[in-house]
Amino acid sequence: MKNIFSSLIISCLAYCCYCQNLEYGHKIMFYNVENLFHPSDDSLTADEDFTPAGLYHWNYKKYNRKIAMIAKVIIAVGEGDFPWIVGLAEIENEQVLKDLCYNSPLKKGNYKYVHYESPDRRGVDVALLYRADSVNILRHRKIPIIFPFDSFAKNRDILHTAVSFNSGDSLEIFVNHWTSRFGGYAATVPKRNFYAQKVRDCVDSIIFKNNEAKILIMGDLNDYGTNESIFEILKARRIADNRKDIDLINLTLDLKGRNVFGTHKHEDFWGCLDQIIISKEFISSESGIRLFGEAKIFDAEFLLVNDEKYGGKKNYRTFLGPRYIGGFSDHLPIYISFRDD
C-alpha cells in the first residue's frame, strides 16, 4: 500500500508539471552573468584580478556564493520547471560550468553543457546549458572571429549548436557576446558589425539548405535592436513589420520589464543590450517547437537595488568598480517560452 501511495504521489507531481508546461511553455533563456571566474590562476589568460591576491580579492567563498546565486536565477526563470536551454556569457572556463551544473541546485535539472575556450584576452567565453532529458545535441562548433582590420585582437568566439527535442523537431542556436563599447561607441562599431555579418552569413547558409529551418540567436550583442549591426546587417526586425523579405524577428526590440526598461543600466539609462532573435519559422510553425507568448526580461525584485544616484532601480551586481557588492550580475536575464509537441 505504501509503494502504491508513493507511486500515486509521483504520478500526480509529474502530471502537475506536465500541465504547468502546457500552460506556461518550456523556457529558453540568456544571461550575462558578469565575470563568473574561477579563483584559480590560469597562466594562459589575464585573469589575475579574479584570484585571492588580485584586484577583486576573488576567493572561493565569493565564488561559491556566486555559483549558488546564478543557479537561483536560472531556477526562478523556469517557474517550477528548469529551463530547457540556457545561454551564458562571461563564464571563464569549463570548471565553472561543472560547478554550476553538478555542484549547485542546478544538478536536479540534469544539465550538461557545450563550451569552447575562446582567444579572449581575459579568458571569458560563452556557453550553452541544456537539459539532457529533453534536449539532444546534434552537432556544435565554435565560429572564430578575426577582424581583417585588427588581426591582433583576441575575440570571443560565437557558439553554434544544433539541437533536437522530444517532438523530433530541431533548432539552430547561436550564442554570442560581441565586442563591448569600451573605448567608445563609434570606434567599436566596425567590430560589432563584423560579428553581425558573420552570424548573417551563417543564417543565410542554413536557410539556403532548408528554408523552414528554425533558428535562435541570443546573446549580449552590446548593441541595441535599432543599431546598424542588428537592424541593418543582421536584418532582425520587429514582428509587427510583417514584411515578406524579413526572415529574422528580434523579440527583444523595444522590450521592457515590469520594473525596468532594459537589461542593463548605464548611469541613468536602461537599455536592452541582450537579445533573443528567431527565424519566422519559429513563430509560424503549427507543430514541433514554436514560440509561446512573448520574450520577457526577468526583473525579479531580488535582482535589483535602489539607485540612490539616478533614481529608480539598478542591477544588483557583483562588483562596482573593484568593490565587491555581492550581487548577481550587471545584466538581467531574458527568456522566451515555447511549445514542443
Image: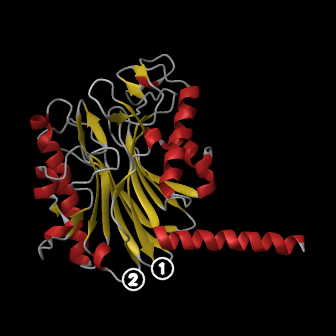
Of labels 2 and 1, earlier in sequence is: 1
Residue highlighted by disc 1: 167
Within 10 Å of the Cα at label 2, are there few (<14), some (14-19), or many (20+) other Cα atoms? few
Relative to 227, say whether 330 is above or below. Answer: above
Mark yes or no: residue 89 visible. no
Q: Please report the residue visible at 34 percent of the width from the left and 34 percent of the height from the top.
A: 314
The answer to whether 196 appears left or right of 261 in the picture is: left
Location of residue 156 in the rendering, given as x and y in whole percent from the top left corner = 30, 43
In the rendered image, residue 258, in percent from the top left (x then y), is placed at: 35, 49
Q: In which quarter of the image is the N terminus?
A: bottom right
Secondary element type, mark 1: loop
Q: Distance between the residues labelled 2 and 1?
A: 9 Å
Disc 1: CA contacts within 10 A as few (<14), some (14-19) or many (>=20):
few
Q: What element carries label 2?
A: loop
- Of the pair 336 and 191, the residue shown nearer to us: 336
Horizontally, residue 86 falls left or right of residue 101, namely: left
Residue 279, percent from left and from top: 26, 69
Q: Residue furthest right?
A: 1
- Residue type for callout 2: Ser
Q: In which quarter of the image is residue 308?
A: top left
From what the image shows, is residue 339 above or below residue 36?
below
Q: Position of residue 73 (x, y in %)?
A: 49, 46
